[in-house]
Image (cartoon, grey):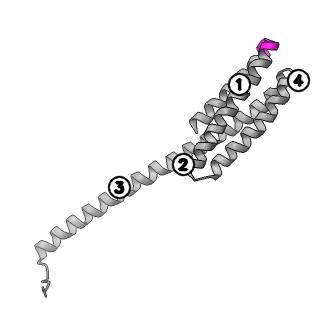
Amino acid sequence: MRRSRLLGNDAREDFSVVQSATLTLLALVIGFNLSMAVSRYDQRKNYEEEEANAIGTQLLRADLLPTDEAAALRALLAKYLELRIRYYQVRDKDTLDAINRASEKLQARMWHAVRAGVAAQPNAVNALAVSGMNDVINRQGYT
């Protein structure tokens, strides 16, 4: 069995310097990691809020389209909203991938409904519906 011997004053000073430097470096690493995590959390929260606002805005802009296309778009947006809410509640990668694929299919159908409505009555007001649909698709891509 090895016996530990007491450190001399010089060795104790050296040990204290190394210990202080190591703990300071550890505190910096932890601080940087925490800072990055908090900023990423805030960014994701902002993206989620922007996506919700884009969907709500598009729901309102659906009224600018002709009646049939507006009704179809509202129904598709309701299904899309359910998918997006599920996306934020699920953690399983396979389920998330399935939700993303279903979201992309619904985006294509919503885009088709908007495009059909604008083609039936092309004007500047209907262009707002196209712009809103573009925002919905883009916001989902950001999140």
- Label 3 or label 2, whichever comes before in sequence order: 3
Residue 19 is marked as: none
Residue 67 is marked as: 4
- Label 4 or label 2, whichever comes before in sequence order: 2
Q: CA distance from mark 3 to mark 2?
A: 20 Å
> Relative to 20, is 55 above or below?
above
Q: CA distance from mark 3 to mark 1?
A: 48 Å
- What is the x, y in percent for residue 39? 50, 46
Residue 28 is marked as: 3
Give the residue type that dot 2 points to: Tyr
Q: CA distance from mark 1 to mark 4?
A: 16 Å
Q: CA distance from mark 4 to mark 3?
A: 60 Å
Which SS class for mark 1? helix
Residue 111 is marked as: 1
Which SS class for mark 3? helix
Give the residue type that dot 3 points to: Leu
> Relative to 29, is 101 above or below?
above
- What is the x, y in percent for residue 23? 30, 63
- Asked if labels 4 and 1 touch by Cβ distance under 8 angstroms, the answer is no
**Which residue in the structure is indicated by mark 2?**
41
